[in-house]
Each structure stands twice: as C-alpha cells, then as structure tokens.
Image (tube, rainbow, N blue to C red):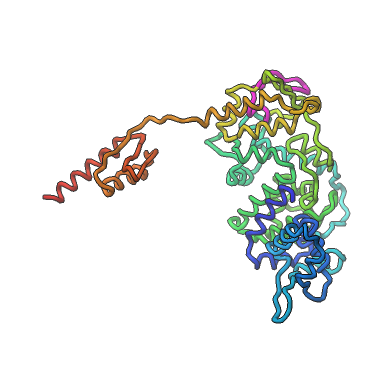
Amino acid sequence: MSTSSIRSFEYLESLPGTVFNRLYKQPSTALAIFRRMLPHLAKSFVMAMLYMPHPLPVTDLETWVRSSSRRDQDTAVDLLERLQIVKRTAEPGQPRSYNLTNPFAASLRLALTGAGNHKSFGVPDNSERDERMTIPQLDEFARTQWESVLGYMVGSTAIGLDNAGANLNLSVKRLLQGGALVEASGRNVYITQEGFAFVLQEVNAQVWTILVLYLENAEQLGMDRVDVLSFLFMLGSLELGQSYSKTNLTPTQLQMLLDLGDFGIIYQDSPDSECYYPTRLATTLTSDAGALRSASAGFDGALRSSTTDDKGFVVIETNYRIYAYTSSPLQIAILSLFSRLSTRYPNMVSGKMTRESVRRAINMGITGDQIIDFLYTHAHPQMRKTPSVLPPTVVDQIRLWQIEGERMKSTVGFLFKDFPSASEYDGPCQYAADIGVLVWKNDARKMFFVTRHEQVAAYLKSQKERKKEAGR
C-alpha cells in the first residue's frame, strides 16, 4: 500500500459504521476503495465472494491460500473487516463464514457491469461550447496552482519565490497552518519538519495529505463528510480533458469545487459556470501511479504519467559545495533551506553547505536525515555511479551538525530545595508551574528549578505570613 493509500486508509478506519453504509451506496466509492486500498489477495477474496449466493466458510477460504501465506491471509481479511467490506457470520450449527456487506457488494457489481442510473461517475457535459479546455491547458493550471502551494511553504522561508503564495486564498493558508505544515509568526511563514517531509513526498501522497486535512476540517465548515469523501473518490474515476455537469452535485460538493480549485485539483471558468474539469491531480487520486517526486521535476513527471525515476540534478562534493542543474525556482528555494547559494546561472545554481545553513534548517525543525534523503533522491546520475551516491564525509558531517543541538543545554535559574514537608513543597512548585517559570522538579527530593525567583519568593513569604496569622 502506497503512502497516500495509508494516509487515506487511516482516515477511513476512524469513521463509524453508519458513514461506511452511506459511502458504499455510491458505486464510484466502492470501486475506488477496491482499486486503491486493497492488496491483491484481498481483491481476490472480494471478487470470489462477489457473486456467491451464500456466505463463504472459513475452511473453504483457507484452502485457497498456501499454509506458508497464512499471515498474508489474516492481514487481508483483517483489512477487509476494518473497512467493513467483509463481515463474519456464525449460524447455529454452521461453520464460521465470511460474507460481503451490503451496500458495498451491490455497488461494486454496478460499477463493474456499468448498470444502473446512479450517476456516481459524474455526468459528462456534452453541450456545445465555443472554447473547451485542452489537456495541456489543464496541466499548466494544475502545475501553477500546486507549485503556488509548495512555493508558499518553501519560498517564504528560503530565498523566496516570485509572488510565492500570492494567488492562494486565506482558507488554503489556514489549512496548511492547521495541518502543522507551516508556522506563521506575524507576516513570516516558516516550514516545519512535517512540512519538509511533505515536500519530499510523491505528488499523489501530497494531494492526499492535503485532502485528509480538508476532510478533518469539513464538519467545522458545515460540510457533510460523506458528500466530501464520495466526491473525492468520484474524481479519481473521471476522464482527463472531459468537462462534467454540476447538475447532480450536492451543495457541499459545489462548495468543494471552489476549494479544490485553489489546489489545482479542479478547474472551472468561474464559480457560476455550468461545468467543471478534473485536472490530472484529480484523475490520479485512485490510481496506482509510481512514487513520483514532488517539486518541478516530480510534478512534471506526474503530469506526464511517467513511471520512470526522475532525473537527478544535484552534485555535491566532499568540500560541501553544491551544484544544482535546475532552473526551477521551487527546487532552488528548497536547496536554500539548508545551503548557502552564491551563484545562479540560467540552468544551474551553486553554493555550499555550511554549519550555519544546516543548523538554520535544523532549528526550523528539518532533520538531518531529511536533508540527506533529499540529496540522495535528487542526486545527479553521475553521482549514482559511486556505491555510496553521496560522499560519506558530507553525510556524517550533516548528522554531526544535528547532534550539536542535541547536547546538554544550560539554563540560568534558581533552585528551591530543603522543604520540611511535602505540603510545603507542593504549593510553591505548582505556583511556579502555573506562572510558567518552572523548568525542572523532583518530587521525591522536594526540590524544583525556576527561571525567575521573585514571584515564587513572594509566594513563599505570603504563605509564611498566613501561617503566622493562623497561629496567633
């Protein structure tokens, strides 16, 4: 199961049974989950039981699988049960059996045979129009919008992209901040450790990460999450370049067209237009595309539906100098997160990794392993001719620079100790925690450490005076 499938599966697994019952009424949803989230063995079980008139006994199921693959069988059945596709039945006097749930089985049969008038796979717009969007135009729109998202995350932190995030709506920026992909401090935006890991993901996984964040906030926006999920799964079954009518969409799904357009997943001429176009980011949501890397090179690969590895562009020497054969502002901005770029040519930038540049990245939450992973993933083909790909001295030094920040840290403050009883210790210790000056405490030895002592000392003095007054 790919990274994007795992993320979407984790969200689905948390849903109650009533939500699954509504979801599976849509044939497009049943087919998308069958295609996207089930391993081959689980798919075989589903197809074998799809037209069975009676439940399948466990003993019969076990005869289909070799004894050496029992663990795979248990994993497949467990996954089907967690997605509420299969349920166990136990009739008195009958062996334990498995049965496909309804409406999943009925919807999958409709999807596979093309029967029914459910319109869950979209309604093509066949009206005559003067101008229709072409596939290259849709690809360009999707690329521009998605790179605006990545540019907002990376460009505002690094050397800056031209108008990074300028076209993003406020709701998109809030979603990225709410998902802890970026942190805002005044007018400045900084990428987080989770955000950098997001940038390193394949494009399809990035899209699903954003969509899961959107799903988690759907109810707060007054949206029906079943409608949201059904629409997302439907998008994966639509045809690229074909326009679709809005006539069968719910109010929630009409609102989604506006929101998904900000990410380049959907295109429409205007909010009032009668049709919409899914971009390649939408039509590959439920596909088994390969792990295509993000940013410009990876995105270009996604738009080409390429299954080959992206061509690397980074050369790094043992003296920590970096040469990047790219003209992508986004890739350059990512490099500048952990290196000091000094020279830029039309098709290449050069610079150097220094202690200060790597420590700056680490202070933003980016780990040394993430930096190494980025360099390894985008290493130039010439570097891949060596067994280690990256110079071992560079890899070791990046890790050493990270360890520097994980050593013992000194804090100037004051130690309170020698309390005669636990009751006299608990009060000031809790007071120090309440006012935010407590750094460390040891309840067994009745001592604690604070950054400021004035308020704690005043508290102790007031407690002492109260005891004197009480003793009079």
Work out whether 367 lies above or below 104: above
The one of 291 and 229 positioned closer to us in this rendering: 291
Work out whether 35 lies above or below 466: below
At x 76% / y 51%, what residue is drawn? 285
At x 81% / y 32%, what residue is drawn? 311
**From where the camera sits, is residue 460 visible?**
yes
Would residue 338 be counted in the magenta stretch?
yes
**From where the camera sits, is residue 246 visible?**
no
Where does residue 434 sit, x and y in percent of width and height? 36, 45
Where does residue 392 sit, x and y in percent of width and height? 68, 25
Would residue 278 be counted in the magenta stretch?
no
Q: Which residues are magenta?
A: 333-352
At x 71% / y 60%, what residue is drawn? 79
The one of 31 and 405 positioned closer to us in this rendering: 405
Q: Quadrant of residue 374?
A: top right
The one of 3 and 253 positioned closer to us in this rendering: 3
The one of 310 and 407 positioned closer to us in this rendering: 407
Where does residue 462 sit, x and y in percent of width and height? 22, 43
Q: Quadrant of residue 375?
A: top right
Work out whether 77 lies above or below 272: below
Q: Residue furthest bottom?
A: 93
